[in-house]
Image (tube, coloured by chain):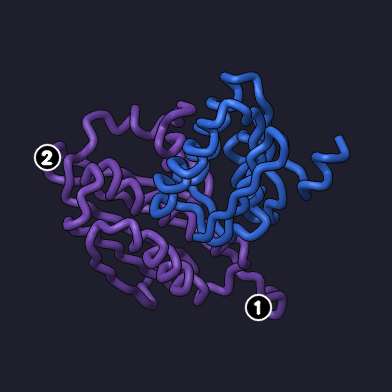
Amino acid sequence: MNIKNYVRLEFPSLPENVSFARSCVGAFAAQLDCTLEEIGEVKLVVSEAVSNCIIHGYENRNNEKIMVMVSISDDRSLEIIVDDYGKGIVDIKQALQPTFSSDASRMGMGFTFMKSFMDNVEVVSTVGEGTSVTLRRQFMSHNKEALA
Amino acid sequence: MKIEFKLVRNTVVVKLKGELDMLIAEKLRQEIDSRLEDKRVNNLIINLEKVTFIDSSGLGVIIGRYKKIASRKGRMYIVGASPSVEKILKFSGINKLIPIYKSEQDIINI
């Protein structure tokens, strides 16, 4: 499996950059000849991961760094890595559970969306140092000629 | 994101345009809550016809307003969600608490 293309983004933890990050990754993922629905799912998971960095990793501080690395491989797989250098997650297993609180700022579904719309989600975190979320998805070809 | 409000009898109707994510979530929460402070208001309709994206930040605002409306025994509805937005609403299960209709007219016809 060889990497065909990649992009690295580095931006401050501003809420404005959540939209930018998901649009950028969505545009990059379009190289995979995926459907609009699939691109929408990719944009959603990026939105969740980057929002997590700002809200939880950095506790809404806006002058911190977020890194997003995206790569496409020749087997039509997409890998997205979202890194922050914030407070880290004490209990990753608990963080990955869906939570439902009507007064929660975000309904606690970020990781649920990531797990549902990506084939694989890996979370590595160290308290006081930061969190890295890796999302992988394999895309099938929608090109009928390619299947012939 | 553009936010428009209108008051129809005891119902606040909020019409949103754009993307509903963490950038707008807090402002939207405050704007809706300020209108819900009017004790005459019992019901809330959120029109998502022109909303092009929603994530869990947006869902959080919606479900938080549901609790406020439910506490005063009011009703809340979502209208006009596009297929992609409705997919996320249903995935989250919000539709089990808040009915989703195609248009405001459909609610009037209930």
Q: Residue at x 35, y 66 (%)?
A: A70
Chain assigned blue: B
Give residue A63's mark. Answer: none
- Binning the other alpha carbons within 10 Å of mark 2 as few (below 14), some (14 to 19) or many (20 upward) gives few
Chain assigned purple: A
Q: In the image, is residue A75 above or below residue A115?
A: below
Figure quadrant of the N terminus of chain A:
bottom left
Label 1 vs label 2, nearer the camera: 2
Q: In the image, is residue A81 above or below residue B100?
A: below
Q: Which residue is mark 1?
A: A146
Indicate the position of residue A32 as horizontal and vertical percent values: 52, 73
Q: Please, what secondary structure does the residue beneath circle 2 have?
A: loop
Q: Residue at x 47, y 73 (%)?
A: A27
From the viewer's perspective, is B27 left or right of B49? left
- Binning the other alpha carbons within 10 Å of mark 1 as few (below 14), some (14 to 19) or many (20 upward) gives few
Q: Please, what secondary structure does the residue beneath circle 1 have?
A: helix
Where is residue A111, by image quadrant? Answer: top left
Q: Which residue is mark 2?
A: A128
Q: Residue at x 88, y 39 (%)?
A: B109
Report, in whole angstroms, how far the alpha carbon at label 1 lies from the one at label 2.
Answer: 48 Å
Indicate the position of residue B53 as horizontal and vertical percent values: 55, 57
Circle 1: residue type = Ala
The foreground one among B43 and A93 is B43
The single residue placed furthest to the right in the displayed view is B109
The single residue placed furthest to the left in the displayed view is A128
The tag earlier along the polypeptide, 1 or 2, is 2
Indicate the position of residue A148 as horizontal and vertical percent values: 72, 77
Q: Residue at x 22, y 30 (%)?
A: A90
Can marks 1 and 2 be said to lie on one chain? yes
